[in-house]
Amino acid sequence: MADPSSYRPKPGQIPESPGVYKFRDEHGRVIYVGKAKSLRQRLSSYFQDLANLHPRTRTMVTTAAAVEWTVVSTEVEALQLEYSWIKEFDPRFNVKYRDDKSYPSLAVTLNEEFPRVQVMRGAKKKGVRYFGPYAHAWAIRETVDLMLRVFPVRTCSAGVFKRSAQIGRPCLLGYIGKCSAPCVGRVTAEEHRELAEEFCDFMAGRTGTYLRRLEQRMHEAAEEMEYERAARLRDDIGALKRAMEKNAVVLADATDADLIAVAEDELEAAVQIFHVRGGRVRGQRGWVTDKVEAVDTAGLVEHALQQLYGEERGDAVPKEVLVPAVPDPAEPVTQWLTERRGSRVDLRVPQRGDKKDLMATVQRNAQQALALHKTKRASDLTTRSRALEEIAEALGLDSAPLRVECFDISHLQGDDVVASMVVFEDGLPRKSEYRRFQIKSFAGQDDVRSMHEVVSRRFRRYLQEKQKTGEWEEEAARAAEEAAGATGAAGEAAGATGDVPGAARATGDAPGAAGAASGSAVTPGAPGLTEATGTAGTAGSTGATGTTGPAGQPLDGPAEGPSGPIGEDGRPKRFAYPPQLVVVDGGKPQVAAAQRALDELGVDDVAVCGLAKRLEEVWLPDEDDPVVLPRSSEGLYLLQRVRDEAHRFAITYQRSKRAKSMKAGPLDTVPGLGDSRKQALLKHFGSVKRLRAATVEQICEVPGVGRKTAETVAAALAGAAPAGPAVNTATGEIIEDEATGTAASSNGGTRP
């Protein structure tokens, strides 16, 4: 537990301007982001007597090891920057509303030539009109089925649409009148777009005018004795009214508003949102979160507004937002919402009438959601806690392993050897920190050697990030003293050549410790890894905190996978947060390889175990007998889930690599040749065989291909052996292109 006074800024260093601040832990990971009208006043409140702080705030400041801040000009900018940083860093002590599911929306793809009506989930796309979100996808499909009778807009996929256009026959919906069949030219693109826009207008709440127009056309048809057309219009009106009945009228016509309600207790909070458009409830959604920071109802509302409208623009932000409590101050939030909408947005608490009654309904939904969540989570929390405690007891750990990383190796008879790393925190998967590896140091099948390489690379990156954040300085001094005391002059000489793991070199370098002079490091015994040098970082600061600047070059070259949690410049980095337990998929040999990799790097605070598939035995390093957990053990079940997830992630990656290699052709080996120029070359010459026979000057005639690229292509193809001809598997005949003698592939292309 850190002492907040150890990193408290000096008096007068904190400005009184508005801004955003970040607390970081000892590993440099951002654990809390906040904003303030006055940075000096807000930050000073954290560095008072710990007894006077809220328990959650006290936990945060004692977990932190540094504080940084960024000055902005207005409170609105502070609100925007706070939202961006919370999304980027995912701080553990910030309130984060995590939805338990992806809500479907009704989408109209106005960005296509022939707009399509469909159910969509996930991130919103530009040029697509959305309605909802809805609680269930079947509710959208029922509404669309009723409305297609009046608005026969395309609902088919691109493949079905293209196929119908090729054969000249529409799909079933086209025959029964629920699609205008633009695929076969029954309507033009302009007429179909007009139908889609009318569909959108009706869904947006402009229903009265359209219904009156249909009723007038029905009466005119009846007067003209066109009874069949009048009957069809009557049925259309009935279908639209049934669709409207699915969304009850709750507010006055043309009212666009979002109602947000909060139900909370000391530990958790639930938020429910009703989306009202045109006076009708068009969608509903909700979140549940842990109250990991000291926050009141107004603060929860502010976080909910950020989550709800942080990625929205235009009409997606309604004219009116009704809340149970207005954030203090309200002006920055209102101005932020107004900027996102492009026109004035009212943020207020309903006091009377229909809006207050509807807010009570939303509040009841929030209370029910919180009660349901607590019922579900009670057993989950108990089970996960018991599982982690059982693992700690079985493996002899000092505390429960809150972060577990599992490694698995996958290959196909020694080819395409890859590895996976999955992360579980608090017994739950954290998929954003999963990583994938390619085995680089050797070819062939050797699971033990592969495991050693992967664990070495993962923790080498951790040590590199540790070096960048300046954590190695004290450890380097201790390592040097211990090495000098243990080995004397001989140890110093061996350390100068890098032959003794953990020994300090003459230049001040050591694996697992930062060098005082050049900052270089070497890892002896690691397969396929070379020495990399870098310069120790200079002290830098954000605001007045004096954080350590970046170190030199990476110890393991480019890292694999997407960005990880932290970085010395405030950007996500890889492998920067260490686990308490490493699990490997395998038995005693794999466990020994993983432990040897940690020992060579000087990492001694991470436990290692392996889970063998045959008998589900848990193996520990340097133990002749495995640890056998009961079959009913929650700890064993959690280890199995971690192992199975690592296996799934590894084999998925291995299959994707194998699929790519099977599709690879001679042009894929040409360095610097992208897909667009590959297609241009094949389109120009017609086949790889013709391309192989072409001269450099002829290749240069292809648009976008310069002489240097043409020479590279010619040299690569000249060294590639021609492939065999294509064979018809049904008849055994060799398929030859009559014009060129090249074998034609089944998909209409050619291959050499």
Image: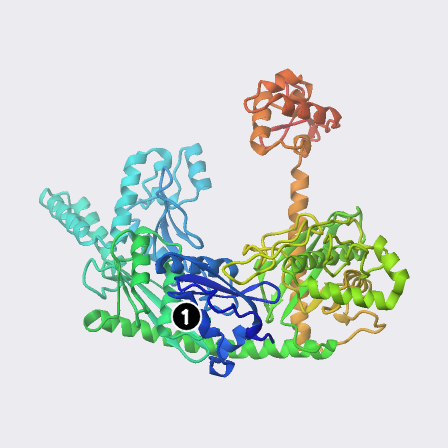
Q: Give me the residue at 66% from left, 60% from top.
A: 466
* Frontmost residue, 606 versus 477: 477
Residue type pointed to by label 1: Gln
Q: Position of residue 603 (x, y in %)?
A: 74, 65
Task: Please state the horizontal and vertical placement of residue 700, each as a whole percent of the image.
Answer: 60, 19
Q: How many marks?
A: 1
Asked if residue 293 shows in the view, the reply is no
Give the class, few, some or many, for how many residues have Cα within 10 Å of label 1's Cα (few <14, many ≥20).
Answer: some
Residue reaching furthest to the bottom? 51
Q: How is the image coloured?
A: rainbow
Q: Residue at x 31, y 53 (%)?
A: 339
Q: Quadrant of residue 420?
A: bottom right
Is any atom of residue 352 visible in this view? yes
Tell me the quarter of the image containing the N terminus. bottom right
Q: Position of residue 244 (x, y in %)?
A: 25, 59
**Quadrant including the C terminus:** top right
Q: Quadrant of residue 245?
A: bottom left
In terms of depth relative to the viewer, which is nearer, 497 or 353? 497
> Badge 1 is on which residue?
41
Taking depth in this image into account, of 427 and 74 the one nearest to the observer is: 74
Question: In the image as oriented, which residue stretches furthest toward the right?
Answer: 490
- Residue sitting at 14 percent across and 43 percent down? 226
The image quadrant of residue 643 is bottom right
